[in-house]
Image (cartoon, rainbow, N blue to C red):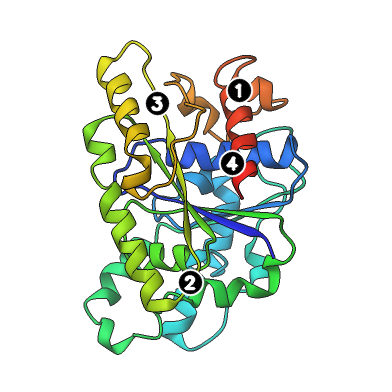
């Protein structure tokens, strides 16, 4: 079975999706691993960074996105098929990476959550944290690594992601706002572990969008590293991802790139993503 890593932060805009995509691409191309990215965020940022919107729309209409897993439980009729829903050879590098696959998310998850959350007692089977793992069990053995891009909350979809994970990784900008929710994440994970008996462990914190000229960023990074043991997140990775003005362009599927160096720059942040991928693999 693959090693499964959820990437989570309660604040948006911390570089979580960019990091998920970059790690998936480096694991696939640089290390030759077969990787599945699962986009559980209704904003679908990882989805549209890795596949065309036209193809996403076609699959969404057919019920072959993440939403289909939960909708089938409500409708009591199976439409979702892991083999059909998972998109193969995704990325805007080289027309797609052979061993990088994607389970796309859906914008319609937002409406789904709003419609059924207030009627949760009638649909308890839909909100069980094991559902995502149950529906993907038959295909997970095909992969070496699974990366799950989580929404910025601790709702039932995030709990599903955490339930099927071996590790969780917390990307942060080293400022007060994006680090504020770390204790809440750790506490909720511990509660989920006690309730379900899963063996989920913190992988650590990845500092992203780091501004070397910022005294706030430098002091917050020192504080995060000093508190790693007592803070419950185990470690802060040595590799720090710098702020990059080209991050929006690399996440645009309509921009095509010849390779990793072309996409992520021939020095930065290419070297940082390469080093981080090696660091992560050393701990999983």
Residue 97 vertical placement versus 131 (above, below): above
Please name which of the two marks, 1 or 2, marks the residue nearer to the observer.
2
Is residue 51 shown to the viewer in this render? no
Q: Is residue 114 left or right of residue 131?
A: left
Is residue 126 shown to the viewer in this render? yes
Q: Earlier in the sequence, mark 2 or mark 3?
A: 2
Disc 2 target residue: 198
200 vs 87, nearest the viewer: 200
Quadrant holding the N terminus: bottom right
Residue 109 vertical placement versus 204 (above, below): below
C-alpha gap between disc 2 and disc 4:
21 Å
Please name which of the two marks, 2 or 3, marks the residue nearer to the observer.
2
Mark number for residue 148? none
Residue drawn at x 26%, y 30% as measured from the top left: 175
Label 2: few (<14), some or many (≥20) within 10 Å? some
Disc 4 target residue: 280
- Where residue 141 sits, quadrant-wise, is bottom right
219 vs 40, nearest the viewer: 219
Labels 1 & 2 near each other (Cβ < 8 A) = no
230 vs 8, nearest the viewer: 230
Labels 4 & 1 near each other (Cβ < 8 A) = no
Label 4: few (<14), some or many (≥20) within 10 Å? some
Labels 3 & 1 near each other (Cβ < 8 A) = no
Q: Percent position (x, y) of residue 98?
A: 77, 46
C-alpha gap between disc 1 and disc 2:
35 Å
- Where residue 273 sits, quadrant-wise, is top right
Residue drawn at x 51%, y 56% as measured from the top left: 167
Label 3: few (<14), some or many (≥20) within 10 Å? many
Disc 1 target residue: 270
Say what secondary structure mark 4 lies in.
Answer: helix
C-alpha gap between disc 2 and disc 3:
32 Å
Disc 3 target residue: 209
């Amino acid at each position: 079975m693959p090693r499964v890593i959820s990437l989570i932060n309660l604040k948006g805009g911390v570089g979580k999706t960019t990091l998920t995509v970059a790690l998936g691409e480096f694991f696939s191309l640089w290390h030759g691993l077969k990787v599945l990215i699962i986009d559980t965020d209704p904003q679908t940022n990882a989805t549209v960074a890795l596949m065309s919107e036209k193809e996403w729309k076609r699959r969404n209409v057919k019920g072959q996105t993440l939403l289909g897993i939960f909708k089938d439980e409500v409708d009591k009729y199976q439409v979702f098929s892991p083999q059909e829903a998972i998109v193969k050879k995704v990325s805007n590098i080289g027309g797609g990476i052979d061993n990088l696959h994607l389970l796309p998310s859906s914008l319609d998850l937002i409406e789904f959550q709003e419609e059924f959350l207030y009627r949760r007692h009638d649909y308890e089977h839909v909100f069980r944290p094991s559902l995502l793992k149950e529906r993907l069990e038959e295909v997970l053995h095909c992969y070496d690594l699974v990366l799950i891009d989580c929404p910025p909350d601790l709702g039932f979809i995030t709990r599903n992601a955490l339930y099927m994970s071996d590790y969780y990784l917390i990307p942060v900008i080293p400022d007060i706002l994006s680090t504020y929710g770390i204790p809440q994440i750790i506490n909720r994970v511990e509660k989920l572990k006690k309730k379900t008996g899963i063996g989920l462990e913190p992988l650590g914190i990845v500092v992203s969008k780091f501004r070397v000229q910022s005294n706030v960023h430098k002091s917050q990074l020192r504080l995060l590293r000093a508190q790693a043991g007592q803070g419950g997140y185990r470690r802060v990775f040595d590799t720090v991802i710098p702020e990059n003005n080209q991050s929006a362009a690399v996440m645009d599927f309509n921009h095509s790139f010849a390779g990793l160096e072309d996409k992520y720059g021939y020095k930065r942040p290419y070297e940082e993503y390469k080093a981080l991928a090696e660091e992560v693999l050393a701990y999983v």
